[in-house]
Image: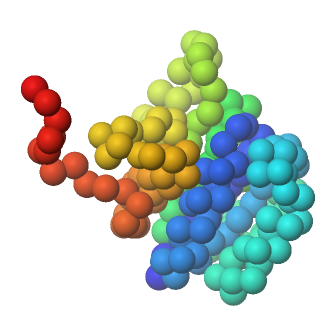
Protein backbone atom coordinates (compact mmCIF):
# COMPACT_ATOMS: atom_id res chain seq x y z
CA UNK A 1 0.00 0.00 0.00
CA UNK A 2 1.20 3.49 -0.87
CA UNK A 3 0.30 6.81 0.69
CA UNK A 4 -0.41 9.53 -1.88
CA UNK A 5 -1.41 13.16 -1.49
CA UNK A 6 -3.90 14.37 -4.09
CA UNK A 7 -4.33 18.11 -4.47
CA UNK A 8 -7.21 19.68 -6.40
CA UNK A 9 -6.99 23.28 -7.57
CA UNK A 10 -9.27 25.62 -9.48
CA UNK A 11 -8.48 24.62 -13.04
CA UNK A 12 -10.60 22.53 -15.38
CA UNK A 13 -10.07 18.79 -15.00
CA UNK A 14 -12.08 17.55 -12.03
CA UNK A 15 -12.85 14.29 -13.84
CA UNK A 16 -9.13 13.57 -13.78
CA UNK A 17 -8.95 14.14 -10.02
CA UNK A 18 -11.95 11.90 -9.46
CA UNK A 19 -10.37 9.15 -11.57
CA UNK A 20 -6.99 9.42 -9.81
CA UNK A 21 -8.70 9.08 -6.43
CA UNK A 22 -10.97 6.24 -7.56
CA UNK A 23 -8.06 4.26 -9.01
CA UNK A 24 -5.91 4.75 -5.93
CA UNK A 25 -8.67 3.65 -3.55
CA UNK A 26 -9.63 0.70 -5.77
CA UNK A 27 -6.02 -0.51 -5.66
CA UNK A 28 -5.95 -0.20 -1.86
CA UNK A 29 -3.73 2.88 -1.54
CA UNK A 30 -4.15 5.65 1.03
CA UNK A 31 -5.38 8.97 -0.37
CA UNK A 32 -4.70 12.22 1.49
CA UNK A 33 -6.90 14.75 -0.27
CA UNK A 34 -6.88 18.54 -0.12
CA UNK A 35 -8.75 20.97 -2.36
CA UNK A 36 -8.63 24.71 -2.82
CA UNK A 37 -11.91 26.62 -2.43
CA UNK A 38 -12.02 27.29 -6.15
CA UNK A 39 -11.17 23.66 -6.82
CA UNK A 40 -14.22 22.64 -4.80
CA UNK A 41 -16.43 24.94 -6.88
CA UNK A 42 -14.99 23.77 -10.20
CA UNK A 43 -15.45 20.12 -9.21
CA UNK A 44 -19.10 20.68 -8.30
CA UNK A 45 -19.67 22.53 -11.59
CA UNK A 46 -17.86 20.05 -13.84
CA UNK A 47 -19.28 16.92 -12.20
CA UNK A 48 -22.73 18.51 -11.92
CA UNK A 49 -22.85 17.21 -8.35
CA UNK A 50 -22.60 19.10 -5.05
CA UNK A 51 -19.04 18.95 -3.73
CA UNK A 52 -20.18 17.43 -0.43
CA UNK A 53 -21.91 14.65 -2.34
CA UNK A 54 -18.70 13.86 -4.23
CA UNK A 55 -16.80 13.82 -0.93
CA UNK A 56 -19.38 11.61 0.74
CA UNK A 57 -18.68 8.84 -1.79
CA UNK A 58 -14.93 9.07 -1.11
CA UNK A 59 -15.38 9.25 2.67
CA UNK A 60 -17.02 5.83 2.68
CA UNK A 61 -13.56 4.37 2.12
CA UNK A 62 -11.39 4.30 5.29
CA UNK A 63 -8.29 4.87 3.13
CA UNK A 64 -9.54 8.35 2.19
CA UNK A 65 -8.33 11.24 4.38
CA UNK A 66 -9.57 14.81 3.93
CA UNK A 67 -7.77 18.05 4.84
CA UNK A 68 -8.68 21.73 4.84
CA UNK A 69 -6.46 23.77 2.53
CA UNK A 70 -6.12 26.43 5.24
CA UNK A 71 -4.85 23.95 7.85
CA UNK A 72 -1.08 24.33 7.78
CA UNK A 73 -0.91 22.20 10.95
CA UNK A 74 -2.10 19.13 9.04
CA UNK A 75 0.08 16.02 9.01
CA UNK A 76 0.87 16.34 5.30
CA UNK A 77 2.46 19.76 5.90
CA UNK A 78 5.43 18.12 7.60
CA UNK A 79 8.36 16.29 6.08
CA UNK A 80 8.24 13.90 9.04
CA UNK A 81 4.95 12.51 7.71
CA UNK A 82 5.94 9.74 5.27
CA UNK A 83 4.29 9.78 1.85
CA UNK A 84 5.10 8.01 -1.39
CA UNK A 85 4.19 10.85 -3.72
CA UNK A 86 1.92 13.77 -4.48
CA UNK A 87 -0.20 14.60 -7.50
CA UNK A 88 -1.86 17.96 -8.05
CA UNK A 89 -4.66 17.32 -10.50
CA UNK A 90 -5.55 19.63 -12.03
CA UNK A 91 -2.79 22.11 -11.21
CA UNK A 92 -3.73 25.71 -11.98
CA UNK A 93 -1.15 28.18 -13.23
CA UNK A 94 -1.63 30.16 -10.00
CA UNK A 95 -0.71 27.13 -7.89
CA UNK A 96 2.19 26.32 -10.22
CA UNK A 97 3.50 29.87 -9.81
CA UNK A 98 3.26 29.75 -6.03
CA UNK A 99 5.11 26.44 -5.81
CA UNK A 100 7.79 27.70 -8.22
CA UNK A 101 8.24 30.80 -6.04
CA UNK A 102 8.36 28.89 -2.74
CA UNK A 103 5.11 30.42 -1.48
CA UNK A 104 3.55 28.03 1.03
CA UNK A 105 0.48 29.88 2.25
CA UNK A 106 -1.90 26.98 1.59
CA UNK A 107 -1.72 23.31 2.51
CA UNK A 108 -1.51 22.27 -1.15
CA UNK A 109 1.49 24.52 -1.75
CA UNK A 110 3.11 23.54 1.55
CA UNK A 111 2.71 19.81 0.84
CA UNK A 112 4.18 20.31 -2.64
CA UNK A 113 7.10 22.27 -1.17
CA UNK A 114 7.70 19.46 1.33
CA UNK A 115 7.64 16.90 -1.48
CA UNK A 116 10.37 18.83 -3.28
CA UNK A 117 12.55 19.37 -0.23
CA UNK A 118 12.26 15.71 0.79
CA UNK A 119 12.97 14.58 -2.80
CA UNK A 120 9.63 12.81 -3.04
CA UNK A 121 7.73 12.39 -6.33
CA UNK A 122 5.59 15.41 -7.23
CA UNK A 123 3.39 15.25 -10.33
CA UNK A 124 1.79 18.47 -11.54
CA UNK A 125 -1.02 17.91 -14.05
CA UNK A 126 -0.96 21.47 -15.32
CA UNK A 127 -4.05 22.81 -17.06
CA UNK A 128 -3.84 25.81 -19.36
CA UNK A 129 -3.55 26.46 -23.05
CA UNK A 130 -2.00 28.21 -24.81
CA UNK A 131 0.93 28.66 -22.46
CA UNK A 132 2.66 31.99 -21.98
CA UNK A 133 6.34 32.47 -21.14
CA UNK A 134 5.67 32.77 -17.39
CA UNK A 135 3.88 29.41 -17.37
CA UNK A 136 6.72 27.77 -19.30
CA UNK A 137 9.43 29.27 -17.09
CA UNK A 138 7.63 28.10 -13.94
CA UNK A 139 7.30 24.60 -15.38
CA UNK A 140 10.96 24.47 -16.37
CA UNK A 141 12.03 25.75 -12.96
CA UNK A 142 10.02 23.10 -11.11
CA UNK A 143 11.15 20.37 -13.49
CA UNK A 144 14.76 21.27 -12.69
CA UNK A 145 14.00 20.90 -8.98
CA UNK A 146 12.46 17.46 -9.35
CA UNK A 147 8.77 17.91 -10.17
CA UNK A 148 7.20 16.00 -13.03
CA UNK A 149 5.24 18.36 -15.28
CA UNK A 150 2.47 16.35 -16.85
CA UNK A 151 -0.20 18.22 -18.79
CA UNK A 152 -3.13 15.82 -19.25
CA UNK A 153 -2.49 15.13 -22.93
CA UNK A 154 -4.56 12.13 -24.06
CA UNK A 155 -3.10 9.24 -26.03
CA UNK A 156 -5.02 7.74 -28.93
CA UNK A 157 -2.92 4.73 -29.95
CA UNK A 158 -5.22 2.52 -27.87
CA UNK A 159 -8.24 3.88 -29.76
CA UNK A 160 -10.34 5.04 -26.80
CA UNK A 161 -14.06 4.91 -27.50
CA UNK A 162 -15.32 7.19 -24.71
CA UNK A 163 -14.32 10.29 -22.78
CA UNK A 164 -14.25 8.10 -19.67
CA UNK A 165 -11.61 5.85 -21.26
CA UNK A 166 -9.47 8.89 -22.10
CA UNK A 167 -9.80 10.26 -18.56
CA UNK A 168 -9.00 6.91 -16.92
CA UNK A 169 -5.93 6.34 -19.09
CA UNK A 170 -4.61 9.87 -18.45
CA UNK A 171 -5.13 9.48 -14.69
CA UNK A 172 -3.48 6.05 -14.78
CA UNK A 173 -0.50 7.52 -16.58
CA UNK A 174 -0.04 10.02 -13.75
CA UNK A 175 -0.19 7.19 -11.23
CA UNK A 176 2.38 5.24 -13.20
CA UNK A 177 4.69 8.23 -12.84
CA UNK A 178 4.30 7.70 -9.08
CA UNK A 179 5.20 4.02 -9.48
CA UNK A 180 1.62 2.77 -9.27
CA UNK A 181 0.53 0.41 -12.03
CA UNK A 182 -3.10 0.17 -13.13
CA UNK A 183 -4.92 -1.70 -15.88
CA UNK A 184 -6.29 1.59 -17.22
CA UNK A 185 -2.90 2.44 -18.76
CA UNK A 186 -2.19 0.16 -21.75
CA UNK A 187 1.45 -0.50 -22.56
CA UNK A 188 2.55 0.09 -26.15
CA UNK A 189 3.95 -3.14 -27.58
CA UNK A 190 5.50 -1.68 -30.71
CA UNK A 191 2.97 -3.13 -33.10
CA UNK A 192 0.33 -1.37 -35.15
CA UNK A 193 -1.74 -4.52 -35.55
CA UNK A 194 -4.28 -4.16 -38.34
CA UNK A 195 -3.45 -0.56 -39.29
CA UNK A 196 -3.25 -0.18 -43.08
CA UNK A 197 0.12 0.91 -44.43
Nearer to us in this view, 77 or 34: 34
The answer to whether residue 9 is left or right of residue 48 is left
Residue 26 picture quarter: bottom right
Nearer to us in this view, 93 or 196: 196
Kindly give the residue lying farthest to the bottom in the view shown. Answer: 62
Q: Quadrant of the C terminus?
A: top left
Residue 92 picture quarter: top right
The location of residue 84, given as percent across then percent down, is: 49, 68
Identify which residue is drawn at 69% across, 77% down: 64
Q: What colouring does the structure picture have?
A: rainbow
Identify which residue is drawn at 80% across, 68% down: 55
The answer to whether residue 44 is left or right of residue 146 is right
Nearer to us in this view, 129 or 179: 129
The answer to whether residue 101 is left or right of residue 42 is left
Determine whether 82 is above or below 131 in the image: below
Determine whether 104 is above or below 25 in the image: above
Residue 120 visible: no
The location of residue 49, given as percent across then percent down, is: 85, 57
Identify which residue is drawn at 61% across, 65% down: 21
The location of residue 159, given as percent across then percent down, is: 35, 43
Determine whether 32 is above or below 190 in the image: below
Identify which residue is drawn at 66% across, 43% down: 13
The location of residue 54, given as percent across then percent down, is: 80, 65
Residue 2 visible: yes
Amino acid sequence: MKRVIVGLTGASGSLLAQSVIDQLLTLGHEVHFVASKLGEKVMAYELETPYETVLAAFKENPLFHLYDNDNLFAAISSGSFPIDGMCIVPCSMGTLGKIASGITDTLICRAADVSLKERRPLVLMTRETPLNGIHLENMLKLSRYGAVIMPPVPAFYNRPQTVTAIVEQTAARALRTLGIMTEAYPVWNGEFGDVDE
